Image (cartoon, helix red, strand yellow):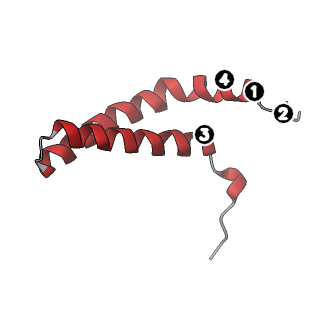
């Protein structure tokens, strides 16, 4: 079994999507009015929409904005 290469993990995406899942789950819970199935469906649909937006438009913008504040890269 190989070990995890921690430097290969895209930490910005991991943290952003983790926070997004938390927020979407809470929104789905509130909009479901106590129905667990409806809450799960709302949460899944909101996450799918947000993940598509993150993957196809927001990821590069956020990554570049954060990189501007970090130390200069090598090369």
The residue to which callout 4 is attached is 65
Toward the bottom, the furthest residue is 1
18 on left or right of 64: left
Q: Is the Cβ of the residue at disc 1 closer than 8 Å to that at disc 2?
A: no
Tell me, for residue 73, which label it has, or none: 2
The quadrant in which the C terminus is found is top right
Q: Residues within 10 Å of mark 4 (few under 14, many from 20)?
A: few
> Where in the figure is residue 63, as x and y percent of width and height?
63, 30
The residue to which callout 1 is attached is 69
> Where in the figure is residue 35, as x and y percent of width and height?
10, 48
How far is mark 3 from mark 1, CA to CA?
Answer: 13 Å
Residue at 62% x, 45% y is 11
Q: Tag 2's secondary structure?
A: loop
N-terminal of the pair, mark 3 or mark 2, is 3
N-terminal of the pair, mark 4 or mark 3, is 3
75 on left or right of 42: right
The residue to which callout 3 is attached is 12
Q: Is the Cβ of the residue at disc 3 closer than 8 Å to that at disc 1?
A: no
């Amino acid at each position: 079994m190989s070990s995890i290469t921690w430097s290969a993990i895209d930490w910005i995406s991991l943290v952003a999507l983790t926070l997004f899942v938390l927020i979407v789950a809470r929104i789905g819970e509130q909009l479901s009015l106590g129905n667990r199935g409806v809450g799960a469906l709302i949460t899944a649909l909101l996450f799918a929409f947000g993940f598509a937006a993150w993957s196809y438009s927001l990821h590069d913008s956020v990554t570049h904005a954060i990189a501007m504040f970090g130390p200069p890269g090598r090369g």
